[in-house]
Image: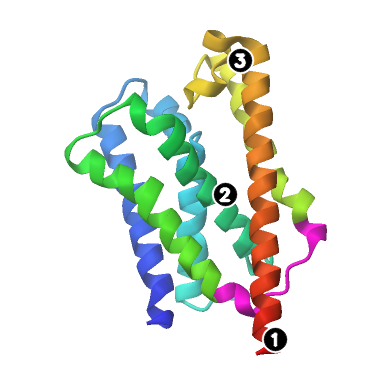
Amino acid sequence: MKKYAPILIAFIAWFAVIAQFVLMMQNLVAPVGESIIRFFSFFTILTNTLVAVYFTREAFQVSGNSILDKPAFLTAMTVYITVVGLVYQIALRHVWDPQGLQKVVDELLHSVVPVLVIVYWYGKVKSTQLGWSVLPYYLLYPLIYLVYVLTRGSFSGFYPYYFINVDEMGWQTVGINSLVLLLVFLGLSAIFIAIGKRVSNAEEKA
């Protein structure tokens, strides 16, 4: 079953991202070019795409010297997709009520994929050596993303999430929300690293 897990996760992630793209194209609210940029401005889409690429490589047993092959990358990615799930359940689920295929895709992106990745990570981390030195690097992806969406939003007026919408909430509130999110990333990263070290140490002693 373990060898089929990457195939399953890759398939679900690709299906969810592609289906969401098709649904977006069927309900355009902006010109095509702008809509595509907006689509890839969502942290959910970027992170699920990252998951899809990673597990596609795992399924085909592709290896090399890219960052995806680094031992700590799986843990970082697991943190990111966990945040996708948590933020949706806490801050976004109540703001809309998707129906039909949109509801299915929504659950895949925000619930199913995060859970599957966490389960896979837990089984894989037994053979992975994690160190605290990687902790600051885990914040690079969310920091770069945040700078990008805030910068682009100041020119385009489009912000993918209401809690970072400067036009509606102002810089002070968005600044506080951003700081809280970065602390969530930092806290979850520390938790995952701690769990990973504990599991790995227990495996070595067994």
Q: Amino acid at mark 1?
A: Glu
**Residue at 40% across / 46% down in the picture?**
110
Q: Position of residue 107 (x, y in %)?
A: 31, 46
Quadrant occupied by the C terminus:
bottom right
Position of residue 7 relative to residue 117, above or below, is below
> Which comes before the other along the chain, label 2 or label 1?
2
Sort mark 3 into few (<14), some (14-19) or many (20+) by Cα contacts within 10 Å.
Answer: few
User: Who is closer to the viewer here, 65 or 161?
Assistant: 161
Asked whether residue 147 is in view, the answer is: no
* Residue under label 3: 154
Query: Which numbered circle lies on residue 94?
Result: none
Q: Residue at x 61, y 73 (%)?
A: 125
**What residue sits right under mark 1 in the picture?**
204
Residue stretch rendered in magenta on the structure: 124-134
Label 1's element? helix
Q: What amino acid type should be assigned to the residue bearing mark 3?
A: Ser
Q: Mark 2: which secondary structure?
A: helix
Q: Quadrant of residue 128?
A: bottom right
Q: Between marks 2 and 1, how big is the CA–CA gap?
A: 27 Å
Q: Nearer the viewer, residue 57 or 51?
A: 51
Mark 2: give few (<14), some (14-19) or many (20+) Cα within 10 Å. many
- Residue at screen point 42% across, 58% down: 115
